Amino acid sequence: MSESPHFSYELAFDRNLGWLTEWEQLALRGKCVAIAGMGGVGGVHLLTQARLGIGAFHIADFDRFELANFNRQVGATMQTIGRAKVDVLGEMARGINPELRIERFAAGVNPQNIDEFLQGVHLFVDGFDFFEIDIRRRVFARCAELGIPAITAAPIGMGAALLIFTPGGMSFEEYFRFEGRPEHEQHIRFLVGLTPRGLHRAYLVDPSRLDLAARRGPSTAAACELCAGVAAVAALKLLLGRGGVKPAPYHHHFDAYRDKLVLSRLPFGNAGPMQQLKLALGRRAYARATERAPATEEQPYSPSSTVEQILNAARWAPSGDNEQPWRFQILGEDAVAVHLTYSTTNVYEYRAGEPNVLAGGMLLESIRIAASAFGRVMEWHYEGGETERHRIALRFLPASGTAVDPLYSYLGLRSVDRRPYRLRSLTQRERSTLEGVLGDGLRIEWHIPLASRWQFARLSARATDVRLRAPEAFPVHQRIIDWNRRFSPTGIPAGALGLNRPTLSIMRWALQNEERNRLLLRGGTLSTAAQMDYAPILASAGFFAIRTTRSAATPDERVHMLLEAGRSLQRFWLTASKLGLAMQPGLAILIFAHYGEHAIPFTSDADVARRASRLAAEFRRAFGAGTDDFVFMGRIGEPRPQRLPCRSTRRPLPDLIQGEDKPTRPAAPSA
């Protein structure tokens, strides 16, 4: 058995020398730093400063590790779940320097032990949870009284906000101005004081995840690591008295996502006029968020079985108007029944609900791909249809050595992009790759030249005109357009329609009632078509149409054929995402041209029916054939960067599962 390695302080921290002198390294060995909180920033503060060679720490935290800590907390692993944070981080720090003198405060910092926590320390580093304002104020105030410099380095977005408070300088309270304020106002003041320039706001993609009232906010490990780095440098300067620091009222904010470093000086702290304006805006944002907040907070749903994990990944399959026309019935550890409706709410019964059957095929392919990530292969069998419903039986079989399908990571990234794309053509490699995943049952036609794109833009504009004018479509538009959310689990966010703000405002007004809608339509639909059809289709790599090359003798054979076609279409769409391409289906062209071609009475408005007939005639001129063999069409191209995404999401899995074994989303534990 080999002997345990001998620890040498001099050898362990020798590589610090050069940036530090030998006597400075020796001085750090005699310093003591107090760190409150061993969570996101506190734990990495400890380990980073331990690697500087600081010799003693007081660490405090009353909490234990759990799964929710994994995204950012350096001590959170499967092996440490349930263990006290101070114990885990103390062991990790002593693993770096066995000579460390560590005093643990397992009950956290409280008014009774502040003096003990700060006794003999040379620096205080704030690792408290963002929402712990009261005890934070007490500790900073006591540091000022004892002449101990104090640092707060807050992980904000993907950056670090740094404030340094030195003896005799501006105090924590003078900067933030908490005195006499209610708790929610203190949270607003802390956030605005930490981020006076608000660099993070430009890329906060889902503001609903920041909920001050519920004491909840998003976080990243990158920000915690950045905080530890800037705080360690500030600690080094303060402990060694070299280099100089810029304490409050100076504020430092480095944002790695924005590639920006801001040094602000707020001589009046939050009492300054600009900060007062920002506080007012913060209060308004807080009030709006509170009004939208749910009555009870739910914990994130966590799949409890392999089958649920597979379905949870696969539920991101596309469907018309984000209808999600499927429900799952879990029949055992390896069996699921998929119940697929013809149409649950859509007024258009296009070819007996064919778009939903195609969507069902896309779901099947998504399930197969997801199953590969869990070492399973999927077998499926179409069991026939009942009234407005199909049933598909699935089995998941373990298969050792199963490779994860390379399209797995694109299941959730794939989405509909209705914006104009970059003006570049598809490469031959891109077209060949996309054609290759369709298989033998489908044939794709590319319509690339500008004249062809113009032709299809006209077709799409005519289809938009029919849809907007059909009175039967009015309640559908009312239902599916989500005006309140940028991420809609049951509809399409208004911001994802591809319309500018003035047009959206007019549309929202018109959708209040049918009379307003009719009044708006008297002016025509050209403005809407220009934004939703002409601009996007002309600004794309091209338009494509996909036909089936197979025929079916019976309705069940037709359904089976469409399910297989849907599987190929999902591979096509996911492959496009893998190639960095975006897509937007153009099924409205196909649906309304089909109605006009076969004189299907889909509307009570004779003028709308005539418009559909003209669309059908133009469709035949464009494609040289009728609609019967076509199953899918749309536009494709390289997307433009999107600063703040806006898209349809999906219902949580428990809402899609039927039966006695239906999983539930647990409510948040009571305080």
Image: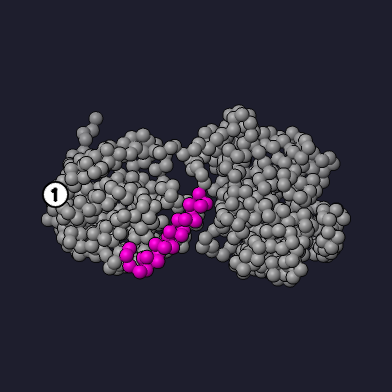
Give the crowd class for mark 1: few <14, some 14-19, many >=20 residues within 10 Å. Answer: few
Rendered image coloring scheme: one colour
Pick out the residue farthest to the left.
23
**Above or below for 601 versus 63:** below
**Residue 479 drawn above or below residue 653:** below
Of 470 and 623, which appears nearest the observer? Answer: 470
Q: Could you say which is closer to the camera, residue 333 or residue 463?
A: 463
* Residue pictured at 20% horizontal, 64% vertical: 244
Residue 524: x, y in percent? 75, 69
**x, y percentage for residue 345?**
72, 47
Secondary structure that dominates the magenta span: helix
14 in relation to 275, above or below: above
- Label 1 belongs to which residue? 30
Residue that extends furthest to the right in the rendered view of this protein: 599
Q: Residue at x 66, y 53 (%)?
A: 480
- Relative vertical location of residue 453 with respect to residue 99 in this rendering, above or below: below
Q: Position of residue 407 (x, y in %)?
A: 58, 48
Give the magenta range. 270-293
- Queried whether the magenta region covers residue 277, the answer comes back as yes
Quadrant of the image for the C terminus? top left
In the image, taking residue 298 as reference, residue 22 lies left or right, namely left
Number of marks in the image?
1
Q: Is residue 152 left or right of residue 29?
A: right
Which residue is drawn at the image coordinates 58% and 40% (left, top)?
Answer: 653
Is residue 106 located in the magenta-colored stretch of the structure?
no
Q: Is residue 440 visible?
A: no
The disc labelled 1 sits on which kind of residue? Gly
Asked whether the viewer can see residue 466, the reply is yes
Q: Position of residue 142 (x, y in %)?
A: 20, 51
Badge 1 marks a residue whose secondary structure is loop
Near-viewer residue (105 or 390): 105
Query: 175 and 657: which one is in front?
Result: 175
